[in-house]
Every structure is written in structure tokens, then in C-alpha cells.
Image: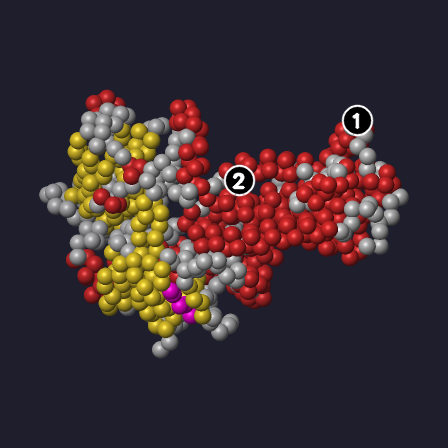
Amino acid sequence: MTQITKVPSHEPTTIYIKPSTGLAALNLKDLWAYRELIYFMIWRDVKVRYKQTMLGAAWAIIQPVLTMIVFTFLFGRIAKLPTDNDIPYPIFSYAALLPWGMFVGALNQASRSLTSNQNMVTKIYFPRLVLPLASILSGLVDFVIAFVILIGLMIYYGVTPSPNALWALPLFLLLTVVTALGVALWLSAINVQYRDVNYALPFLTQFWLFITPVAYSSNLISEKWQLIYSLNPMAGVINGFRWALLGTDTGPGPEMAVSVLISLLVLIGGLFYFRNMEKTFADTI
Amino acid sequence: MTIAISVNNISKQYKIGAAQQKFQYGMFRDVLMDTLMTPVRVYRALRGQGMRGTAATSTIWALKDVSFDLEEGKVLGIVGRNGAGKSTLLKILSRVTEPTKGTVTVRGRVGSLLEVGTGFHPELTGRENIYMNGAILGMKRTEIDSKFDEIVEFSEVGQFIDTPVKRYSSGMYLRLAFAVAAHLEPEILVVDEVLAVGDAEFQRKCLGKMSDVAQQGRTVLFVSHNMSAILRLTQEAIVLKKGQLIKRAPTAEAVDFYLSSGQAESGQRVWEADEVPAASQPFRPVAIRIKDRSGNIVDTVRSTEPLTVEWEYQLDAPITALRVGIYLSTMRGEYVFTSFDTDDARQYEQFGARQAGRYISRCEIPADFFNEGRYSLGVNASSFGVKRYFMDENALSFNVDISGAPGTQWPEVRQGPIRPRLNWKIEKLD
């Protein structure tokens, strides 16, 4: 057996273990200390996601493109839903399907992230936040792949993005991540004790799709309902994407502010709920 | 000397609902009843009474007011019978779960040899899993980079390092996983021998690693049921009983106290009322014993003599299709056999349905069966396809002494859990 040479690589840090009371401190410092683990988890998710599939990463494109074709046929051709500024329906819906797909994928992956990594949770200490966070961020890779198709569509239909796109797109992408993380924190923590989440999630995302302007324009909603409608943070996300990419009139305004605010509230609430449940994860999972 | 671990009055409370499966084999009636009871269950859950509200949720203290300090560089043994709180203590020290009360101060990184292979993904290659697993165990990437070659060499899987680990044999898989854990170099190492898995070679590596670590002046906590290992590897030990620390002393004294205070598994395991989950009803285990040829309850049996296993239990109501039996496994977790009292068809006809009352199921394990070592006896009482009433995978353990067994004239370790006396015939052919 080889003799291992021992060189203490760092000064021991002192750890205090005590029951966390009340609203547990968020302990984001700990999350920062484990940033490499986040990186490795994202990398693992990305590497493993399309293993042993025939079409591989093409799935990241097939899903939104097929949905776009179906939507174009049903809502564009048959129902003849109007789009903003007469933007061709395919690109109108695709620009919304991108963030929506990212959101739904993130919820699916992240709400299961704790239960599918059960042996990690019951055997090792690490900030549990790493798991939902990494599974959401790994969805960004699919987003980027599917985005290439959008660029193609924009060239084909001759749509030039507004100059705002450069700064606004990253911000709205961030808003998608924040919204997904906020919701996923609640769902993943509940899922540890009540696996009902796995069954409820498909319904949740389906109903959520109906109240989000993916297949239709939010301008179809009458003026007096607009503020209530924007309580759905995903409405803000998608309106923002359309505004930045396609130059619709659904840009920043009071409705957008409501969406952002709700999204932040869900995230903050989710963080505290998650942290508060975290201490019993290993016992109840 | 500086204090590496300081434990102050920690307690840990667990909820023990009837966490057993509600309808393991999906009988239609059960599913239907379960569906109809949904509103009641949701109501109870919302009122914070836990999901399995049907069976009263009770709580137990897995640890109660445990305090001790451990100086840096010391090796501390932890002994106590099953359920005494040993593993809970280690889980709290490694921050997997939080104490309900009390505080712990730990100076340095806590590593554990049970985390072996955690986070390994079958689709990733050996190389990728080393990085992944290292990150999970809290190593920095630079740290893994610098130890990568050592880890690969230690694991002896060199040429397969870029093969997905799902193609590895289980031995290779364990060696690689162990190599990563062994190179974590924590300031404090916790080893739970009870839970350790793997083959004999792997176990030896674990223990070897542990004494290496101890010699380098690191702090080690060692949980084991194997008193000779505790005596060999630790200078000091604590004894836990029902979640409380009842003794701390130099190892020899602590082990002596533990063995003589009657709570050691000295050939008998008695279930007290609070140790039997409510879900076992109407089956209630009373005791399981190991007896030698003259009927004495013994902890060490001679392999050259038959031994008797006796399981005493109480049925509070009649049970049909009952089978009561034992699993036998080595301390490394390999099963040796499983046997039930109604395995024989005629026996099943007569005793499959049993009236309420107290029973003993007894069987004899013949002479010349076991090899040297320590074995674990698990128990199971169930109705096949209907319900598992009671199960304890590690109810009792016992030692086997092989003096006089076949082949003992050669002082060597014989492989395998059994050591039969086979009827060899030697013929000369020319």
C-alpha cells in the first residue's frame, strides 16, 4: 500500500454546530465557500443529461421547435390569434417558448434535486441550496443551444432586435432564473417530505402556461386586468423577452415592476423556507 | 493540547411515526381506503401532525444531554448497542443533521469513511468522478489536481480511469471511491464500522487507513461493535446507552464496563417495549438468544459445536401466513443465509396461522458451519405478500471461535464465511 504524504493544506477552521432557531440565517457565505461544488454539479448535470440518448443535445432544440410548430398551426393558423406589431407567429411564440422552456425544465429538475441526490443529503454536509441552484443553472446550456434557432428565425423573418436587447436580455434571463429558483426552493423543500410534488408539478406547469402569454399576446388582456395579470412573474419575463428581441410594446412599466417584485418575494420567501426546512432534510427524506 | 471537538449537552429528537410502508404490495383494498382517507390525512398534515398521521406520531430522544471534549490527536472509541445513538452522534458531528439542543465546536474538517462513493455518477468516467466526489467532500479543485495521480495509483484502476464507472467491477468502484475519501485528509476522521461495507480487503484498508491517520496526530472517532478492534485502535472510549453517555474511561476499562453492565450483546437481545414500533402490531418481539450445546446463552460459539438460535415473541392477535425467521450475515454485510420457521411445507400447514399467545421459534445451526469471525443475526417476521410486521437487520451479533475446526493446524486466514468439514477422499491412481 502506498504511503500517503500528509501536508496539512490549510489552517483548520472552527465550525460551530448548534440548532438553528427561528428564521435560520441564510448563511450565503457557506454557499460561496462551496461554489466549486456548484460548478461541478452543473457540469455533471450537463454531461449526464443526454447520455445514452440517440439525439443527444438536439433535444434542447427539438422540444421548443416542435412546440412552436404546433402553436403556429393551432393558434396562428386556426385560431388566428393576433400578435403584437404583426410579428410572424412562429418567431412570436418561439421568443416566449425559450424562457418558458427554461423555466419548466428548471422546475422539473430542481424540484427533484434533493430527493434524487438522497445519498448525498443523508451522508454529507454541504449547503443544500447547491442542489436546486445547480440544476437550474445547468438549464442555461439548453437555453443557449435553443437560442441559436431563434437567431436563425430572426434572420429568416428579417426581424432586427431592439438595441435594448444587449443589456435587457441578460437581465430578463436573470429574472427567469430568479423566478425559477424562487418557486423551485419551495417545491424541492416540500418534496422532501411530501412526494406529492412530483404528481402536482405537471398540472402546475400546465395551468401556469395558460396564464402566461406564451401562445398569445398579453395585450389581449383588457386594461383593467393587466395589473392582476402581471402578478404572474413569468408574464413579466416573457413580455420582457418579446420587448427586447422583437420590439413589442410590452417593455418595462408598472406591470413589469409588479412581476419583478413578486418574483423577488417568492425567492426571498423560498430562501427562508428552504433554510428552515434544511435542518430536517436528512431526517425526513 | 488544543481541543478538537467539544460537545456540549447535545440532544437529538426524532419523530418515529409508523414509517413502514403503508401497503407494500399494493392490495386494492388498501389503495382504495388510502384514497378515501386523503382528506383526513391532508387535514392532519396541515395541522402539522405529520403525513403518516394514522399511527400516532411519537418521538424518541436518540441522544440526550451528551457532553464530552476530545483533544487533538486522540483516538476515541464509541461503544453501545444498536440504537444507543452512536451513528446519530457521528451524523451531528459531520453536520449531516442538526442537534435538537446543545452545541458542538469542531476544529477542522470532518471526514468520514462512510461517505465513500457518495455522488459517484455511473455515466461519468473515473477521472470525472474523482473531481466530482472530491468537490462533494469539500476539496478544492487545486487540491484534487495535486493529489490526482496519488489517488489513481492508490485505487489501482489506472488504465480504466477514462472509462465510465458503470463499466467498473464493484471492487474497482469501491477502490476508486475509497481512494478519494482517503485523500481528503481531514483534521478529524469519523469511522462507523457498523455501516462500513465492502470485502475483507476493503475493510482492512479502512482500518489501516484509520491507524495511519491516528499516527499522524489527527483526531479519530471510531464506532464499532467489535471490542477487539476498539481495544486495539483506541486509547479511550465512551459508552452510550439509550442516547446518554454513561461512561468515559481508558478503553480497557470502558469496554469492561460495557461488557459487564449487561447491555453488551452478550448472546441475547431483549426488546423493551419502547424499542418496538407501533406498526409491528400485533407482532411483538421479546428476545433473541444464541445458546451453546449445553443451553447456556453465549456470545462466542465454537464452530465445532452446533448452536441454537431462539426467538421469543408475543402475538397480540392471531396472524395468518406468518413466517418468523433469521438472516445471517458477516459483519461486512455479506449475507450467509436466510431461513424461516415455516419454510417446510408441513410446518407451514401447521403453524402458518397462529393464535395469539407467546411463542418461541428455535432452530439449530449444525457444527462445522461457520468460519472464524463475527456474524450478525437479523430477524424478520412477515406474511409473504401481505405485510412485514417486524424487521431488524442487525438484532444481535456473535463471535465464532474455530479452535479444532478443519485446517486449523495451519495458522492462516481462510477465505469465506463458512468452514465446512468436507469428506475428502484421496485416491492413489497408479
Is B403 one of the magenta-colored residues? Answer: no
Residue drawn at 19 percent across, 61 percent down: B257
A71 vs B122, nearest the viewer = A71
Q: Quadrant of the N terminus of chain B?
A: bottom left
Q: Give the image's coloring scheme.
A: secondary structure
B115 vs B66, nearest the viewer = B66
Indicate the amino acid at tag 1.
Ile
Q: Is residue B237 visible?
A: yes
Badge 1: residue crowd in 10 Å (few <14, some 14–19, many ≥20) = few
Residue A130 point in image, percent of width and height = 56, 55
Question: Is the residue B350 above or below the residue B108 in the image?
Answer: above
* Residue at mark 2: A197
Which of pointers 1 and 2 lies earlier in the amino acid sequence? 1
Residue B165 point in image, percent of width and height = 54, 48
Q: Is residue A265 left or right of residue B53?
A: right
B78 vs A51, nearest the viewer = B78
Residue drawn at 16 percent across, 43 percent down: B291
Residue drawn at 39 percent across, 61 percent down: B93
Q: Quadrant of the C terminus of chain B?
A: top left
Callout 1–callout 2 Cβ contact below 8 Å: no
* Residue at mark 1: A78
Q: Is residue B213 visible?
A: no
Q: Which residues are magenta?
A: B103-107
Query: Which residue is the extreme one toward the bottom?
Result: B1
